[in-house]
Amino acid sequence: MNLNVEIVREHIASLCQPAVHAGAVCVRTEGVRFEISNNAVTTVTPDRTTPSNTTKARNQRFIERRNEA
């Protein structure tokens, strides 16, 4: 298909790099969600503007555990 994968990687890195340095676990931009683990993008999914209730609850538990540490 003659897709230049390196250009795509560079674009994703330019979008995610500032958030990774700030400690983010995901970046939502350009209609997609980039999930980050160990300073690398591991998953790319279509972005939903409103997270599910399960996701909200999970995120709240994560925040609470982080604040306890």
Image (spheres, rainbow, N blue to C red):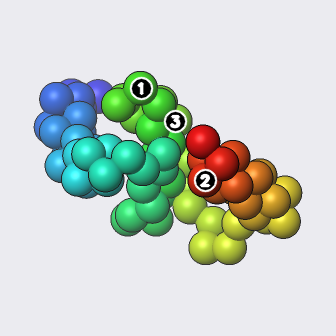
- Number of marks in the image? 3
Query: Along the line of sight, which residue is nearer the eye, 45 or 51?
Result: 51
Q: CA distance from mark 3 to mark 1?
A: 12 Å
| Of the image marks 2 and 1, the number of the one nearer the N terminus | 1
Q: Secondary structure at mark 3?
A: strand
Give the mark nearest the N terminus, 3 or 1. 1
In which quadrant of the rendered view does residue 48 lie? bottom right
Q: Residues within 10 Å of mark 3 (few under 14, many from 20)?
A: few
Graded by Cα atoms within 10 Å as few (under 14), some (14 to 19) or many (20 or more), the crowding at tag 2 reads few
Of the pair 31 and 22, the residue shown nearer to us: 22
Q: Which mark is residue 55?
A: none
Identify the residue shown where x is 71% and y is 66%: 51
The amino acid pointed to by label 3 is: Thr
To which residue does mark 1 refer? 38
Write the residue at 70% across / 55% down: 64
- What quarter of the picture does the C terminus occupy? top right
Q: Amino acid at mark 2?
A: Asn
Q: Amino acid at mark 1?
A: Asn
Which residue, given by chain and number where applicable, does mark 2 sit on? 67
Judge depth for marks 3 and 1 and give the one in front.
1
Please name the residue shown 61% across and 73% down the image. Answer: 49
Q: Nearer the viewer, mark 2 or mark 1?
A: 2
